[in-house]
Image (cartoon, grey):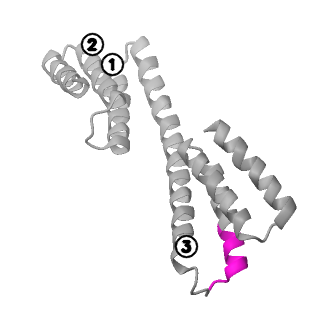
Amino acid sequence: YPEALKHFQRGLRLRLGALGEQHPDVADSYHSMGEVYEYQVKYNEALKAYKKSLKIRLAVYGQQSQLDIPTRDYYYKKTQEAYEKSLQMQQRAKMDKKLRSCDSKAEACLKQQDYKQAQAHYEQSLEMWQKLYGTKPHAEVAKALSNLGGAHKQQGNYHKARAYYERALQMRL
């Protein structure tokens, strides 16, 4: 993809020089770059490229153009999808920071032998991981289950510990 992006950027520079900013071919270049960014999971960059493409198309064809409605709707959709993916990535990043903080607090409590507090932090962490990944098996959810099992084990709650360890194992299989 990096090589493709270089070619699209070069094509964009050539088109801008020859055709100017307000041309459908320039919009095509921006759109192609947006697709490459999307494949690279660079949703903020994809969104910027899609917005530029859409802005040019609307300027060239107008809001009410009957000739380009399917294409215009497609570009609206692509821009919206990129925006939503970008938003999801930002929300996941925020959630990830909260989760890491929660796990760090739990580990600090374990080192201080405050197992009840560690358990509370691990329960909070598990709840957040499950919100993030739903019912799908995921390594982070399995890790949270295992951590919670460890906190119960440290408190002598072997039956609960085993149940959490088994759930973690099932998730990893």
CA neighbours of label 1 inside 10 A, class few (<14), some (14 to 19), many (20+): many
Residue 91 appears anywhere in the view: yes
- Residue corresponding to mark 1: 115
CA neighbours of label 2 inside 10 A, class few (<14), some (14 to 19), many (20+): some
Q: State the quadrant of the C terminus.
A: top left
SS for dot 2: helix
Name the amino acid type tagged 1: Tyr
- Residue corresponding to mark 2: 154
CA neighbours of label 3 inside 10 A, class few (<14), some (14 to 19), many (20+): few
Q: Are the residues at dot 1 and dot 2 in contact (C-beta closer than 8 Å)?
A: yes
- The question of residue 50 being in magenta is answered with no
Q: Residue at x 29, y 24 (%)?
A: 148
SS for dot 1: helix
Magenta stretch, residue numbers: 54-63
Q: Are the residues at dot 2 and dot 3 in contact (C-beta closer than 8 Å)?
A: no
Residue 116 appears anywhere in the view: no
- Quadrant housing residue 31: bottom right
**Mark on residue 71?**
3
